[in-house]
Image: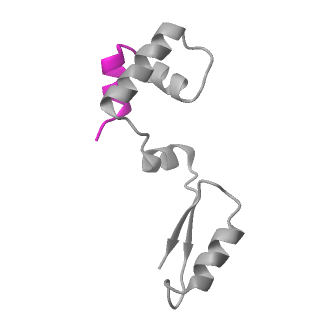
Amino acid sequence: MITIRDVARLAGGSVATLSRMLNSSSAVAADTRDAVLQAVESLGYRPNANAQALATQVSDTIGAVGMSVSEPFWVRRSKRSIPWRSACINMC
């Protein structure tokens, strides 16, 4: 698994700079931004959702328990009632 440290090492910057760039901060120079984007692309870096949830204490995960998860009612109901775009729904 590629980490933010791997990308920072390849880009020649610090983890803090990489984090600022990935979080759309304007405090990053254009040449640094280009180096980071190139490193992200070449390594195939994707942020770890679990690590982000631990750091922000927000997981955007909803759990539901029902008799049958294959019942179409639960699928339709959960998709309509969840206002968040990035929510993850776990049905058991």
**Image quadrant occupied by the N terminus:** top left
Quarter of the view holding residue 10: top left
Quarter of the view holding residue 11: top left
Q: Residue furthest bottom?
A: 67
The span picked out in magenta is: 1-13
Residue 26 appears anywhere in the view? yes
- Name the side, left or right, on which 20 lies relative to 42: right
Q: Position of residue 20 (x, y in %)?
A: 54, 23
Q: Is residue 52 magenta?
A: no
Q: Residue furthest left?
A: 1
Q: Position of residue 6 (x, y in %)?
A: 31, 27
Vertical placement of residue 83 versus 37, above or below: below
- Name the side, left or right, on which 76 lies relative to 63: right
Vertical placement of residue 69 versus 78, above or below: below
Vertical placement of residue 1 versus 19, above or below: below
Taking the spot 31% from the left edge, 30% from the top edge, the residue there is 43
Taking the spot 38% from the left edge, 31% from the top edge, the residue there is 4
Taking the spot 70% from the left edge, 70% from the top edge, the residue there is 80
Task: Compare residues 15 and 33 and report the one nearer the observer.
Answer: 33
Magenta part mainly helix, strand or loop? helix
